[in-house]
């Protein structure tokens, strides 16, 4: 079964550094997402991406965050200047079609630790 | 009011028992609904979609009540492997897909 893949599985970085989290969504999927989950808390929506542009973003997704789909397969989340509170699991997800009944398929996440 | 609310639990049940819990949502225009399970420090995995007429998948039954704006999940004949956090996910009409905070279920031998 096709999978969403994320790399790296764990990223440790110092405060103020830039990080890029990478995702390869399922190939025929159209909508792409980034979510994050701080340890012990709920899954929080960051951003959705469709047709090569952001379709929706949350308050968390401020100017420090950006997303790109530089080629036909990769979908990246960049955090420009990391803060301690950015430490979390970051999940990439994709949806197959524009049908509202299409479920999210998640990657196995990148654990970001900011020290 | 939160977009999606769940009873956090934990629900501690013996093997073989039935456990059920609900999830309420605030957006009456919500289009679709899902239950995911999440094991500790892992990604959420789709358990089942929730259809208007209710649906069953083995020991799991999901119901949707649009009038009262809640969905439910019932697990029959609980197994130890059912121990997890169950996430309610609601798709409004904006593809943002909102998550509940999860309901923790612990099945004991």
Image: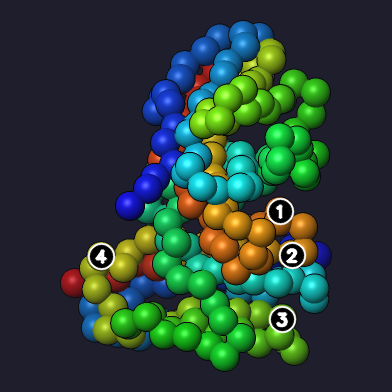
Q: Earlier in the sequence, mark 4 or mark 3?
A: 3
Q: In the picture provided, is A6 more to the left or to the right than A57?
A: left
Write down the residue under mark 4.
Answer: B81
Q: Position of residue B87 (x, y in %)?
A: 52, 62
- Closer to the observer: label 3 or label 1? 1
Write down the residue under mark 2.
Answer: B92
Q: Disc 3 is attached to a residue of which chain?
A: B
- Does residue B76 lie above or below B1 as drawn? below
- Closer to the observer: label 2 or label 4? 2
Both marks 1 and 4 on one chain: yes
Disc 1 from disc 4: Cα separation: 30 Å
- Is any atom of residue B95 visible in this view? yes
Write down the residue under mark 1.
Answer: B96
The residue located at (63%, 47%) in the rendering is A31
Q: Disc 4 is attached to a residue of which chain?
A: B
Write down the residue under mark 3.
Answer: B69
Q: Disc 1 is attached to a residue of which chain?
A: B
């Amino acid at each position: 079964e096709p999978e969403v893949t994320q790399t790296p599985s764990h990223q440790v970085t110092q405060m103020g550094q830039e990080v890029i989290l990478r995702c390869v969504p399922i190939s025929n999927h159209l909508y792409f997402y980034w979510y994050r989950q701080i340890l012990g808390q709920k899954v929080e929506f960051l951003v959705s991406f469709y047709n090569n542009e952001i379709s929706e973003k949350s308050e968390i997704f401020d100017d420090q965050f950006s997303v790109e789909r530089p080629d036909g397969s990769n979908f990246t989340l960049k955090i420009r200047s990391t803060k301690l509170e950015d430490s979390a699991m970051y999940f990439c997800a994709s949806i197959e079609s524009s049908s509202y009944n299409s479920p999210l398929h998640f990657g196995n996440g990148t654990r970001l630790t900011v020290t | 009011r939160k977009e999606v609310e769940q009873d956090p639990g934990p629900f501690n049940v013996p093997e073989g028992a039935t456990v059920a819990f609900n999830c309420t949502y605030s957006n009456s225009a919500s289009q679709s609904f899902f239950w995911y399970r999440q094991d500790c420090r892992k990604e959420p995995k789709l358990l089942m979609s929730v259809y208007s007429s209710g649906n069953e998948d083995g020991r799991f039954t999901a119901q949707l009540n649009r009038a009262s704006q809640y969905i439910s999940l019932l697990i029959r004949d609980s197994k130890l492997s059912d121990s997890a956090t169950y996430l309610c996910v609601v798709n409004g009409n904006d593809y943002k897909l909102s998550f509940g905070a999860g309901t923790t279920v612990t099945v004991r031998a």
